[in-house]
Image (cartoon, helix red, strand yellow):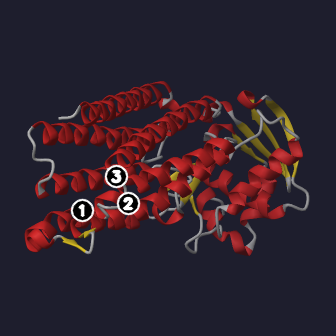
């Protein structure tokens, strides 16, 4: 084995192992330290395993690096089963990356909100793995046609799809957290990851040096981006108010009083004025949280649900920030007030004991013809 090849493979293994271990350590500490936020009552899909799956995806690179080292050390790196093994490692990496995306708040809605779609994609990934293993068995020595490796095409197609999902998710996540430059860098890093696997399908695309340089650069950049993601998550969780510290009081139509000590908001009065839709939506969440059973505390957003889409949740927060005129570090985020339950459902995070509703206001609301469902929730007659 040439020294250059040995250096590349060992660097690949060490960098990947270090990155995966760091992510795993960060995930473990986050899960332990912020358990009171991550494991709220009746909120499934917690503790958030997104970072755990990201670390497992990078650990796959470690195993793939060991496979490459063995292949060169024992001179079977040119064999068909060695190359097929590389494709299977790549698909396994895709599987763990997709599972990580299932926990991302800013992933495309068709996987974030719909569990059935996530299951279908996992099944598709497993099918692609079977197809990758089957092609060499049936194609044999004809697995390469016109400088295109047929065995690598399932992995290439799957990686292209996952690249799109990763770009959308990482860009939205970093942009939402005010890290616009990092969002752009993350897109570049993810594109490089996809470019690095192109030679598997098109062997004559780059020479060996260029291929190895792109691979190690892409993976190092992606690991760095995931570490920034983990750090920003820690900061976000540290700034997330605890459910039992927040208080909200509905005093009259369009008028509330709210207290969130961690955001330096104490007894602040908010007059929604003409923003009646936002006020009514917030009022509905409060009634369900205070009086409803566990199943009735959440509201379906979109999919023909009670609230048309998530924009209405964002507008509640935007209007509150605008009316309160909060500083940048004080501004409320959607996750401060609302918890994602799963399957498109959200509920208010404030605990029922800290929600106060004027009785006259409540009766006026539930007696309206369009709000009869809330009369049964409140057990009012």
Residue on which the image places disc 1:
126
Q: Give the quarter of the image for residue 297.
A: bottom right
Residue on which the image places disc 3:
207
Q: Give the quarter of the image for residue 151.
A: bottom left
Residue 58 at what x, y percent from top left? 35, 40
Residue on which the image places disc 2:
159
| Image quadrant where one finds the C terminus | bottom right
Q: Is residue 129 left or right of residue 111?
A: left
Question: Is the C-beta separation of discs 3 and 1 under 8 Å?
Answer: no
Element at label 2:
helix
Element at label 3:
loop
Between marks 1 and 2 in the image, the one whose residue lies nearer the viewer: 2
Residue 319 at what x, y percent from top left? 82, 52
Sequence-wise, which precedes: disc 3 or disc 1? 1
Residue count near mark 1 (Cα–Cα under 10 Å), binned few <14, some 14–19, many ≥20 = some
Residue 57, compared with residue 298, is above or below; it is above
Q: Residue at x 23, y 70 (%)?
A: 150
Q: Residue at x 14, y 73 (%)?
A: 142
Sequence-wise, which precedes: disc 1 or disc 2? 1
Residue 361 at what x, y percent from top left? 80, 56
Cα–Cα gap, marks 1 and 2:
13 Å
Element at label 1:
helix
Residue count near mark 3 (Cα–Cα under 10 Å), binned few <14, some 14–19, many ≥20 = few
Given residues 281 and 127, the one toward you in this image is 127
Q: Is residue 17 visible?
A: yes
Given residues 171 and 184, the one toward you in this image is 184
Cα–Cα gap, marks 3 and 1:
31 Å
Residue 203, compared with residue 5, is above or below; it is below
Q: Is residue 338 visible?
A: no
Given residues 111 and 84, the one toward you in this image is 84
Between marks 3 and 1 in the image, the one whose residue lies nearer the viewer: 3
């Amino acid at each position: 084995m040439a020294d250059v090849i040995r250096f590349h493979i060992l660097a690949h293994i060490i960098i990947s192992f270090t990155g995966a271990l760091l992510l795993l350590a960060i995930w473990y500490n986050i899960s332990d330290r912020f358990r009171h936020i991550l494991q709220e009552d009746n909120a499934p899909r917690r503790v958030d395993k997104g970072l755990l799956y990201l670390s497992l995806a990078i650990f796959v690179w470690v195993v793939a690096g060991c496979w490459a080292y063995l292949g060169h050390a024992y001179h079977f790196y040119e064999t068909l089963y060695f190359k097929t093994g590389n494709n299977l490692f790549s698909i396994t990496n895709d599987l763990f990356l997709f599972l990580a995306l299932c926990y991302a708040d800013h992933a495309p809605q068709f996987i974030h909100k719909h569990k059935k779609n996530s299951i279908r994609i996992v099944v598709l990934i497993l099918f692609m793995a079977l197809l990758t293993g089957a092609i060499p068995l049936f194609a044999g020595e004809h697995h390469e046609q016109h400088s295109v490796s047929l065995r690598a095409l399932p992995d290439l197609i799957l990686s292209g799809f996952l690249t799109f999902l990763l770009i959308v998710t990482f860009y939205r996540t970093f942009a939402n957290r005010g890290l616009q430059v990092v969002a752009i860098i993350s897109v570049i890093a993810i594109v490089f990851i996809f470019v690095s696997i192109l030679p598997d399908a098109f062997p004559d695309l780059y020479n060996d040096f260029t291929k190895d340089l792109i691979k190690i650069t892409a993976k190092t950049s992606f690991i760095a981006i995931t570490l920034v993601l983990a750090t920003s998550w820690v900061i976000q969780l540290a700034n997330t108010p605890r459910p039992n510290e927040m208080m909200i009081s509905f005093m009259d139509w369009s008028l509330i009083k709210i207290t969130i000590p961690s955001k330096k908001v104490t007894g602040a009065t908010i007059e929604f004025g003409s923003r009646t839709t936002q006020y009514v939506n917030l009022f509905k969440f409060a009634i369900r949280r205070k009086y409803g059973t566990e199943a009735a505390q959440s509201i379906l957003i979109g999919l023909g649900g009670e609230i048309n889409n998530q924009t209405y949740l964002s507008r509640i927060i935007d209007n509150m920030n605008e009316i309160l005129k909060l500083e940048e570090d004080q501004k409320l985020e959607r996750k401060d007030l609302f918890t994602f339950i799963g399957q498109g459902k959200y509920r208010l995070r404030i605990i029922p004991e800290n929600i106060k509703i004027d009785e006259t206001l409540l009766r006026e609301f539930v007696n309206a013809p369009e709000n009869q469902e809330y009369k049964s929730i409140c057990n009012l007659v």
